[in-house]
Structure formats: structure tokens, C-alpha cells
Amino acid sequence: MIHRLPDLPYPKNALEPYISEETLEYHHGKHHAGYVNKLNALIKGTEYEGMSLEQIIRQSDGAIFNNAAQTFNHNLYWLSLSPEPTHPSKALHQAIDETFGSMDRFLQAFTDAAVGIFGSGWCWLAVDQEEKLRIRATSNAHTPLEHHETPLLTCDVWEHAYYIDYRNERAGYVETFWKLANWENASKIFADKEYLQNSGAL
Ligand code: MN
């Protein structure tokens, strides 16, 4: 199948002043598009051509894995941001309280994990195979999908996500992430894992 670059779910300037139009122009239009195009070129004529994005991520390695995983990671990243304020569902809020002690503790733990990733990577809120919430920090293209976990929310901490707006200040960018985090989307996946597919992320 041909993998497609999803449209951004909001206008390119909708996340200003926190994330600029210029950042989205490059991040979506160049970086994300580049991963999708590269993936399509790499799988042509291979066993991966007939697979879903999820199957490719689980079964490939090397360049095909990297481009497939980065395609998915960005698909979810755009859905993890919202220009409008959103709130977690009661069920998700309760699970966060039970797992991390409180919402504030969760935010701090996630922020620390995101800021602490050495080099390029992603920070995630995911549901593990025992149905427990987990904060996952992954390097480069790696994603909780590889471990059969269900990601709810992700923050891209590759420099291309923040360098135009925050230069080297990753911590400032991650702090801003909480102003934009799309809890509504995370709650929908938490309520029904199929929503990851239905939302177009996979
Ligand atoms: Mn990125």
C-alpha cells in the first residue's frame, strides 16, 4: 500500500505563539513528508509493500523501520497537539492519579523524561500489555508500538521540533507542550484502542 502524509488537523499557524508556522511548515511539510516518501520508495517491490504501517513497524528493521516508525510517530504527534484547550476524560484522569499519584506528578515525570532523552527521540504516555499507564522515553525512531503497547500521547524531542522556536532550550519547548497537549485525543485512544486506527494515526 501507498502510505500518505496526513493533512495537519489544524492550520499551520494555529499553534502560535507556542509553535510557529515556520516550524510546522518544515516539520510537517519537509521532515514528516520526507519519512513518508522515503518509506514508499524503500518498500516498493519488497515483502513490506502489502503490509499495514503497524505490521511494517513490528517486522522491519534498518531504514524501512526508521521511516515507517517516524511516519507513525509524527502521525500521532500532530494528533497529540491541539490549538484549543482540552482535558483528560474522567477515566484517564483517574488512571493517571492511580498510576503516578497525581496529574502534577505525572506532568513532572513526563517532562523530566522528555528533557532527559539524550539526543533525538520521543516521550510517550502509553498503555502497556498489562493495561497499565507508562511513560516511555524512546530514542531516534523507536516507538512503544514495537512492544505492543498503545501510545496515547507523544512529544517529539528531535531538535527539528523546536530549534526554530526554542533553539537549544528543549525544556522550554516541553513546558509549552503542556499548553497544547491534546487530552481529548489521548482519552479517545484510552477508551478504545481502535481509535488509534480510526484517527488515521495508523
Ligand atoms: Mn519530528
Image: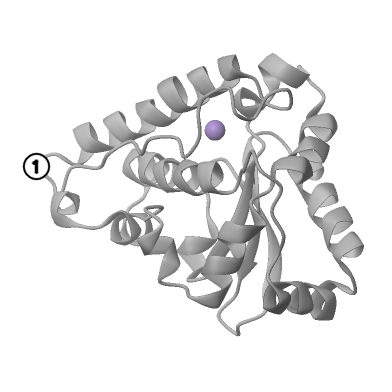
Which colour style is shown? one colour
Q: Quadrant of residue 175?
A: top right
Residue at mark 1: 45
Pick whichever, 18 or 33, lies toward us: 18
From this view, report whether residue 187 is shown above or below residue 11: below
Residue in the picture at 69% in, 19% down: 163
From this view, report whether residue 119 is shown above or below residue 141: above
Please provide percent x and percent y for residue 34: 37, 26
Quadrant where the image shows the C terminus: bottom left
Please provide percent x and percent y for residue 110: 79, 54
- Name the quarter showing ligand 1: top right
Q: Number of marks in the image?
A: 1
Pick whichever, 68 or 5, lies toward us: 5
Please provide percent x and percent y for residue 188: 54, 67
Pick whichever, 192 or 3, lies toward us: 192
| Residue 141 visible within the image | no
- Drawn side of residue 155 relative to residue 26, left or right: right
Report the residue that reaches farthest toward the bottom. Answer: 130
Residue in the picture at 78% in, 36% down: 176
Q: Quadrant of residue 45?
A: top left
Q: What residue type is disc 1 on? A: Gly
Q: Secondary structure at mark 1?
A: loop
From this view, report whether residue 56 is shown above or below residue 194: above
Pick whichever, 137 or 1, lies toward us: 1
Crowd around label 1: few <14 · some 14–19 · many ≥20 (10 Å) = few
- Drawn side of residue 175 relative to residue 81, left or right: right
Please provide percent x and percent y for residue 63: 35, 38
Report the residue that reaches farthest toward the front. Answer: 84
Residue in the picture at 45% in, 41% down: 70
Residue in the picture at 63% in, 32% down: 158
CB at disc 1 and ligand 1 closer than 8 Å:
no
| Residue 105 visible within the image | yes
